[in-house]
Amino acid sequence: MLAKLKELLGNPLSVIYVVLAILPFLAGHFPETNIAVVMGGFFGFCALLGGFFVIKRGETKKHVVPLLIIAIIALTYYFPRQGSVYWPIAWAFPLVFSALWAFDIMRAQSAFVVGIFFMSVFIHVVPALLTDMIEEIDPYYHYKWGNYVYKNGVMPEHDYRTYPKLGGISRSYMPFANPLIMAMFGVLFGNVGMAYHQAAILMPALMAGLATVAAFFLLKEVYYNREGATKAAMIGAFVLMLSLAWSTKAHATDCEDEAFGGFIMLATMWLLLAAINRDNIKGSIIAGLIFGVFVTAWDGHRLMSLVVCGAIALYSLIGVFQNKRSWMYLKHYGVMVIVGNVLWRAVIHPGPGFGFAWLQPHGIELASFVLAIMAAAFNEFMLRDFGGKLSSKNKYSILGAVFVIVVIFVVPNIWYHFYKVGFVDVGQASVVFRTIAEQHPFASGLSNYVKKMASTLGPGTLITLLCLIPMVYLAVKKNDFGLLFLLCWIAPMLWGLYYKSQYMFVASIPLALGASFAGLFMMKSLKDSEGFAVIPTLVVLGILVVYTPVGNVVFNYDVNMIFYNIASYDRTGWESTLQYFKEKPDNTAIVTWWDYGHWITAVSEKHVLIDNLQYDHWEIQDVAEFFMEVQTEEEGFEILREYQEKYRVEPFTDLYDGGVDLKYVAIDWTMIGKSGAMHFIASGNLTTQEDGDYGAYTICSFAPQFSQLEGRLVSQDGSFEQERILIFACSGNRDNVGGVALYMRSDSVRAEVVDGHGQRVPWETWSKSKDASLMGVKSFNEVIGASIQYADSINRIPPTYRTIVYASGEFENYMLARLYFGETIDSFKSAGLADVEWGPEMKHFVPDRSFEEGYVKTWRIVYERDIPLPEAFKQNIPEDDGDGVRNVVAVGDGNLSVSREGEE
Amino acid sequence: MIAVDIFIGLVLMLLYLLIPGVAISYHFVKESNFEGRLFLGSIFGFLQVYIVYFLLKNGLAVLSGWLMAIIFILCVVSILLSKDVRGRIPKRVRFV
């Protein structure tokens, strides 16, 4: 060891590698002036110098790899983009380990696995360097339950904080391993002064690193005993690591179950294929242990059953013609599934207390398993005649019966669960689901599909597409189980993703791993360059170069976006509101749209009517009706009072004395844009699932590029006056309003509507014909003032200051408008831009707080003294002492309270 | 988060998974190589989920804490006692 160290110290290459591996970590302290040229030039020079030493000293050709990495770092510095600063550090890890391989200190596989693990963890942990906030929406569901486990030391059994009409929803059978592990790590972090929040932020980055390694080992098993398997597996793992779609979920600050689920799925698949390839039952039992963990963590096990059973079925059918038995594959899968299913049922069951979940597996799992059994039986029948155990008469009867069962029951069952409820959902009729963006198709056509795949899943997926036909050919010709497995994974995801963009993350895994197939046929050495092997080599290298900074510049594939999967303004704009609600009593409930349900229950730890699970469509419709259907305050209040009544009975009275107080309404700026979805649901028919109406508020944003801010002189009554023209460009709408032009003079304002054909119509004429008004979150004067003052940097001011809202017909009177625009409506009326009968004063809704310049506003709900007590509540309150009837009243600041009639 | 906290957090999580996981892989999967053993160890580390899930589901949070600590210590000892590790430690620094 010491001798090796001395040898390395005398080698200039080792000095170059060590210096260049350390340098990116120190680059943050260097002056920024000319850093791109200085560092880029230095790394480029070192790459050349290293090449010189390799030739001069007759070193091994393995040094090409670390020198190539140095060249990539040089390019990264030379083509700086936002986020480029992280790549030199990321590449420093494979630089070190490839150098150790080049010096024969590590084996190639060891160096690759350790190097890519560290690189993958680093690039996916960068979001944690940029923010301490958990990202977006759905991760908060897991954050909520992890926090619950961390604080209470028990697994969740029931969610009382949502869907009050159902009395909350049962969570006993939910797979909560992901929140549990976050809580476990949280306890661990407590030893070093950190806590659960940090564990929730970091865990997905670790999973991203482990998943990359799992992908490598899995692909080695897929190509078991094939020449070039290791090289192919390296390509697959690399493409997965740099997939933008994969990184949307697998990165620090996204504590949803998908990163952990993706890893545990890859690990389970690896163990199963390893057991199959070695025909090792012990291996499949171990796979079963991990499969059980998988089921307690993520629903992806349904997909896995489809993939493995599909591969077994195909192998069985093709095997009949090639005299290959499939029993062995079914045996290992069966052992894994049985072991896993027994174990997870002992863990997940209605608690607290010992028990066992008597649950039927999901339809697609059952149907897939039955298909695999039938196919393997058919294979066994055709090849071995079941060892001659059946008489020739019975044979054909049984064969016919099997055929009928498969055709009538199994295949339609798989199709039903795959198409209708299990995976694609494209045929699912649901008014609510039709409003969700991720339920929409991923692409609009075939060419658009390929283009979007390359730009979001990564250009490596193009290699997968190119490989599909040769993969099918080889899989069928050789009846190769590994390739059939890969195809059965790629095909449904390729089809499913097209119809449902929600599958972007799940599809990114097989579509990235498929690229590995090309690695099998890449040339082994320069000697092969005269043969066909040069073609896949060039194709793979050409596409992989897109992942480098060169790709950023030439192909516009922005791989740097991996670093910027962080909380957007949608989330950060709510932080102050969530902290405000957090200070309120635990039994406080808030009415808002479902998008903020997880945030309020997870961060503020308060009750909401609906959340992002979209569990009860009827309650979602109630809230939609409150905001976007009823046109009077009383009607809106009646909807909420019905919920308040629900909150005054069990199970809520068991949780808190007097139940839950439905006390606040919260509206944020994005709800203006979401008004279309709310109106669609409110006016839809949930019984027949008939579509509602997609009408929405129209947002008109200040467009300085079309405005005349300098002012022009216009004659008026014999004198001249200066006039500015402010243009507000409107989003698409059914009234065909293209924009609004405001002519501003010192003492007057005149408005014109610019319609879709460019015709200008005076506002008075337009508003009368369309029954239209203009409104705003900020007052008219504030919008105009801010727009003029910040015209040069308009996108840097809050959206509430640079937008006005166009509403016509019934949209003028919905509760969303009455509440959100109520405080400022008088200013628009004064300017002659609004003509509505309502004003800022409301009986049941008192303006409470405004956050982030009106981005979020809250109202207190006031329950009047004369509201009669609901019968259900009367039955559940404690016995009165006989001198009065209890009523729900507003006290002090409008808080709900229970008092006796006549009592002050 | 600051870089030091991130580093400490990642190392802690890895150790938490690797120690029990590698202990299992040492004793039950003999044929694995270095990187395979490490990776296998990290997967086996998740088997702790069964124990903790089961205990928390049954309201035994305190027991789960003690049990996990004992299991963790046993795993460290078992790794140090394994022939593979003993063979790599020079005799003069070997203490078990």
Image (cartoon, helix red, strand yellow):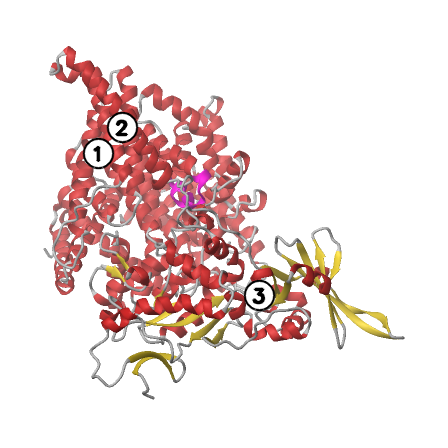
Position in image of residue A788 (x %, y %): 69, 70
Q: Have a look at marks 3 and 1 and say if they share a chain.
A: yes
Taking the view exactly as shown, the residue that stands out farthest to the left is B96
Q: Which residue in the structure is indicated by mark 3?
A: A799
**Is A500 part of what is drawn in magenta?**
yes
| Viewer-nearest of discs 2 and 3 | 3
Q: Residues within 10 Å of mark 2 (few under 14, many from 20)?
A: many
Q: Which residues are magenta?
A: A497-509
Q: Which of pointers 3 and 1 lies earlier in the amino acid sequence?
A: 1
Residue A533 is left or right of residue A3, and the answer is: right
Residue at 40% x, 28% y is A524
Which residue is label 1 attached to? A333
What secondary structure is found at the residue carrying circle 3?
helix
Vertical order, A891 against A331 (above or below): below
Q: Position of residue A485 (x, y in %)?
A: 32, 31
Q: Is residue A870 left or right of residue B94?
A: right
The disc labelled 2 sits on which kind of residue? Ile
Cβ atoms under marks 2 and 3 closer than 8 Å: no
Whole-Å distance between the Cαs marked 2 and 3? Answer: 55 Å
- How far apart are labels 3 and 1 at the CA level? 55 Å
In the image, A178 versus A280, the foreground residue is A178
User: Residue A312 got which mark?
Assistant: 2
Q: In this rendering, is residue A153 above or below A499?
A: below
* SS under mark 1: helix
Image quarter of residue A754: bottom right
Q: Nearer the viewer, residue B23 or A328?
A: A328
Disc 1 residue type?
Tyr
Q: Are the residues under badges 1 and 2 in a single subunit?
A: yes
In the picture shown, does residue A716 fall above or below A536? below
Determine the residue positioned at 45% across, 63% down: A626
